[in-house]
C-alpha cells in the first residue's frame, strides 16, 4: 500500500485533537485526524463540564460561531454555595454576563462539547479517519513515519499527538512523564434531570456520608455529583450502581437516583510529560497525552484547547520558516503552563484531601469563624479549585 503523505497529522479525536485540528485548518493547513475508535463509539460520560471563557475565545477564533453554539447548549450557574458538616459557610449569586459578551464559563457534558467540535471540524474540511489506531511512530530530521493498526503507513512533516492519557505516540517517541497519584478515589455520577436549581454546591465532610466531601456541579440538562472516597473505602459500596442508589439520596432528592446516566470511578493523577516534543522537533504532545490533572479547577480539557492552538501556531511557523524554533518554544511554553496547572491542581487536592493536622484545623477554624469573618468562608469556597489565574496557560494562551 502506498504511503499516505500529509503535511500534518493529528492523532486522537478527543477535545484536544479536535481543537488542534480546527486551529490548524483556520491557518489554511490541510489536516487529517487519525482516531483509533469508530465513528459510532460511545464516549465516556462523567468527564469535563466546565468550558472557560478563554477556551471559548480560542475555539471561536479557530471556528467563528463555535463559541455561540457551545454557549447556547451550556448552562451558567449563577450561584455557588459551600457547606461544612451540614452548615452553610459561603453563598454568592453572581449577575449574568451583559450584552453579547461571552459568559465567564459554560457548563455542558463533554460528550456534547465534543459533538460541537466534531461538527465544526467537518464544516472546516478536516479529514477524520476513524478506526485508525496509531501503533508505531518514528521521527527523523524531516518528519514522522507512522503506521496504523489497519496496516496503513503515513508520513507527515509534523504530528500533533492528542491520543489521551495512554498515548501510544508519547510512548513511541520515548517520552515519559512524572508526577503522583492521589490517595483514594472519586465516584462521579451524571444525573440527567433539569429540575435542580443552577447552583454549584461543595460540601466538606458531609454528615450523611460519613464525613466525605461531595460536590454537585450543574450542566445543561442535569448535574454531576463527585463523591470523594478514602483509600480504605470499598469501591463496590460507592461506585457500583447499587451503591450509588444508596448514597445519592443522602445528598439530593431520592427521585434523582432514577435519572443517573453515567457512573465513573477515578483515581486522579497529576503528571506532566518530561518533554512536549520529540528529539527531532516533529511531534507535539497536547492534552492528556502531555499532562493529567485532577479536575478541580477545570484545567484538563481547557488547557488541551490552549495546547492545540499553540501547536497549530508552532507548526504553521515551522512549515513557513523551515526552522524548529517555534516547536522548541511550544515545548517550553506549554511545559511551563502544564507545570503551573499541575501545581495548582496539587494545591487544590491538598485542600480537598488534607494530610496535615494543621490544614484540618485551619479548615475547622475557618468554618467556625465564617459567620463573623466572611473571608474565611470565601477561602473554604475557593481553595478546592487552586489559584484562580493561569487555568489554561502562561503567556499567549
Ligand atoms: C471527573 C472529571 C471531570 C473533569 N472535568 C473537567 C472540566 O470541567 N474541565 C476541563 O477542562 N477538564 C475536565 N476534565 C478533564 C478532561 O475530561 C480531559 O482533560 C479531556 O478529556 C482530555 O482530552 P484529550 O483530547 O486530551 O484526551 P481524550 O479525551 O482521552 O481523547 C483521546 C482520543 O484519542 C484516541 N486515541 C487513543 N489512542 C489512540 C491511538 N493510538 N491512535 C489514535 N487515536 C487514539 C481516543 O480514542 C480518544 O478519542 C475532567 C476529567 C474528569 C475525569
Image (cartoon, grey):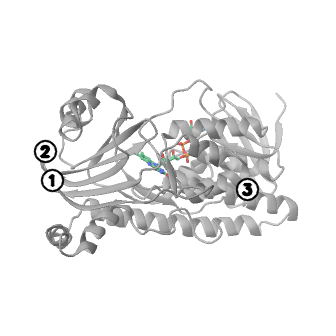
Q: Residues within 10 Å of mark 3 (few under 14, many from 20)?
A: many
Q: Are marks 3 and 2 in contact (CB under 8 Å)?
A: no
Assign the N terminus to one quadrant of the image: top right
* Residue to which mark 1 is pinned: 86
166 left or right of 35 in image = left
SS under mark 1: loop
How far across and how far down the image is residue 47, in percent?
A: 44, 42
For this rendering, which residue is in front, 260 or 331? 260
Residue at image position (23%, 35%) is: 253
Residue 157 visible, this angle: no
* Residue to which mark 2 is pinned: 208
How far across and how far down the image is residue 217, in percent?
A: 37, 47
Distance CA(mark 2)–CA(mark 1): 9 Å
SS under mark 2: helix
The quadrant where residue 189 appears: top left
For this rendering, which residue is in front, 136 or 37? 37
Amino acid at each position: 500500500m502506498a504511503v499516505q503523505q500529509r503535511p500534518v497529522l493529528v492523532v486522537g479525536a478527543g477535545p484536544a485533537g479536535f481543537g488542534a485540528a480546527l486551529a490548524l485548518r483556520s491557518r489554511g493547513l490541510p489536516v487529517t485526524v487519525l482516531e483509533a475508535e469508530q465513528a459510532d463509539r460511545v464516549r465516556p460520560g462523567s468527564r469535563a463540564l466546565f468550558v472557560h471563557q478563554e477556551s471559548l475565545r480560542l475555539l471561536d477564533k479557530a471556528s467563528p460561531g463555535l463559541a455561540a453554539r457551545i454557549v447556547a447548549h451550556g448552562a451558567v450557574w449563577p450561584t455557588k454555595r459551600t457547606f461544612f458538616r451540614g452548615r452553610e459557610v459561603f453563598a454568592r449569586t453572581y449577575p449574568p454576563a451583559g450584552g453579547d459578551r461571552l459568559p465567564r464559563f459554560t457548563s455542558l457534558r463533554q460528550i456534547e462539547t465534543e459533538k460541537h467540535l466534531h461538527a465544526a471540524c467537518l464544516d472546516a474540511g478536516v479529514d477524520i479517519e476513524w478506526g485508525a489506531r496509531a501503533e508505531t511512530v518514528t521521527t527523523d530530521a524531516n518528519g514522522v513515519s507512522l503506521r496504523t493498526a489497519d496496516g496503513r503507513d503515513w508520513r507527515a512533516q509534523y504530528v500533533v499527538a492528542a491520543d489521551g492519557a495512554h498515548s501510544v505516540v508519547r510512548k513511541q517517541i520515548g517520552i515519559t512523564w512524572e508526577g503522583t497519584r492521589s490517595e483514594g478515589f472519586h465516584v462521579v455520577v451524571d444525573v440527567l434531570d433539569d429540575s435542580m436549581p443552577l447552583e454549584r454546591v461543595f460540601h466538606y465532610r458531609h454528615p450523611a456520608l460519613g464525613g466525605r466531601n461531595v460536590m454537585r456541579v450543574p450542566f445543561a440538562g442535569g448535574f454531576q455529583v463527585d463523591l470523594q472516597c478514602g483509600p480504605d473505602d470499598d469501591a463496590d459500596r460507592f461506585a457500583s450502581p447499587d451503591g450509588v442508589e444508596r448514597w445519592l439520596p443522602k445528598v439530593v432528592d431520592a427521585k434523582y437516583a432514577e435519572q443517573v446516566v453515567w457512573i465513573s470511578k477515578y483515581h486522579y493523577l497529576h503528571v506532566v510529560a518530561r518533554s512536549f516534543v520529540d528529539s527531532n522537533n516533529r511531534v507535539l504532545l497536547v492534552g492528556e497525552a502531555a499532562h493529567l490533572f485532577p479536575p478541580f479547577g477545570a484545567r484538563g480539557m481547557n488547557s488541551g484547547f490552549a495546547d492545540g492552538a499553540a501547536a497549530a501556531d508552532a507548526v504553521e511557523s515551522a512549515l513557513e520558516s523551515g526552522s524548529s524554533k517555534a516547536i522548541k518554544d511550544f515545548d517550553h511554553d506549554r511545559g511551563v503552563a502544564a507545570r503551573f496547572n499541575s501545581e495548582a491542581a496539587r494545591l487544590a487536592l491538598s485542600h480537598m484531601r488534607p494530610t496535615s493536622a494543621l490544614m484540618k484545623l485551619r479548615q475547622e477554624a475557618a468554618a467556625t469563624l465564617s459567620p463573623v469573618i466572611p473571608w474565611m468562608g470565601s477561602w473554604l469556597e475557593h481553595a478546592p479549585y487552586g489559584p484562580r489565574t493561569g487555568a489554561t496557560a502562561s503567556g499567549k494562551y
